[in-house]
Image (tube, helix red, strand yellow):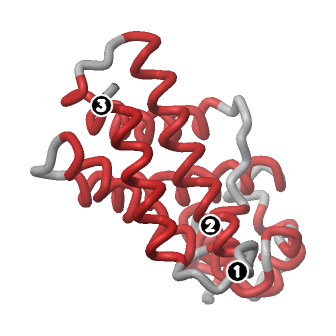
Amino acid sequence: MARAALSADAVVDVALRLVDEEGPAALTLAAVASRAGVATPSLYKHVRNLAELRALVSVRVMDELAERTGRAVLGRSADEAIRALMLAWRAYVVAHPHRYSAVVQAAEPMVAQAGDRLVAIVLAALRAYGLEDSDAIHAARCLRAAAHGFAVLEAENGFQLPEELDESYDLLIRMVIAGLRT
């Protein structure tokens, strides 16, 4: 990467490629600088420190997940929207396991804003069930935990029994939907 092409977005691009290839633990300013072909101090023109880079990576990942799930639920409602959302969530995590695991669950305002966009998509998908206020929040948390938990276990080869994972995930989706209907 040419030095003139370096920007905060370009630094995040390099960081994501590093994370995709080597995992979240490999994310250091020195490693990113090396891949970008610059000295580590050159990165400080674009990111304040490693914590900010991790936050920017988290924002990008959440934005990608929000874009995928948002596109999946577009024009759908109720059971169809929940199914599409959960399938899109799983597909993203399985396709980008290291990237997904690099997300920091921090109170950093930019990370919280990206999380809010994702939560808004989940809440919109839940509207057809008539859930409001705290009921909607509880349902969103449960849906997220179900999709997240299954996808992370799958991405980490946590399922060793011979039954088909697609069948198990379809059962999970049906269980979530049945819960939402009650």
Residue at label 3? 181
Q: Residue 145: horizontal and vertical position, in percent?
A: 59, 44
**Quadrant hosting residue 122:** top left
Q: Residue 139: horizontal and vertical position, in percent?
A: 45, 28
Q: Quadrant of the N terminus?
A: bottom right
Q: Residue 71: horizontal and vertical position, in percent?
A: 24, 58
Cα distance in 3D space between marks 1 and 2: 37 Å
Secondary structure at badge 1 equals loop
**Quadrant hosting residue 135:** top left
Residue at label 1? 161
Q: Which amino acid is tagged 2?
A: Val
Cα distance in 3D space between marks 3 and 2: 41 Å
- Residue at left offset 69%, top offset 48%: 55
- Residue at left offset 23%, top offset 19%: 130
- Crowdedness near tag 1: few (<14), some (14–19) or many (≥20) residues, C-alpha within 10 Å: few
- Crowdedness near tag 2: few (<14), some (14–19) or many (≥20) residues, C-alpha within 10 Å: many
Earlier-in-chain disc, 1 versus 2? 2
- In the rendering, which numbered label is found on residue 12? 2
Q: Which amino acid is tagged 3?
A: Arg
Earlier-in-chain disc, 3 versus 2? 2
Q: Is residue 120 left or right of residue 32?
A: left
Q: Residue 154: horizontal and vertical position, in percent?
A: 64, 73
Secondary structure at badge 3 equals helix
Earlier-in-chain disc, 1 versus 3? 1
Q: Quadrant of the C terminus?
A: top left
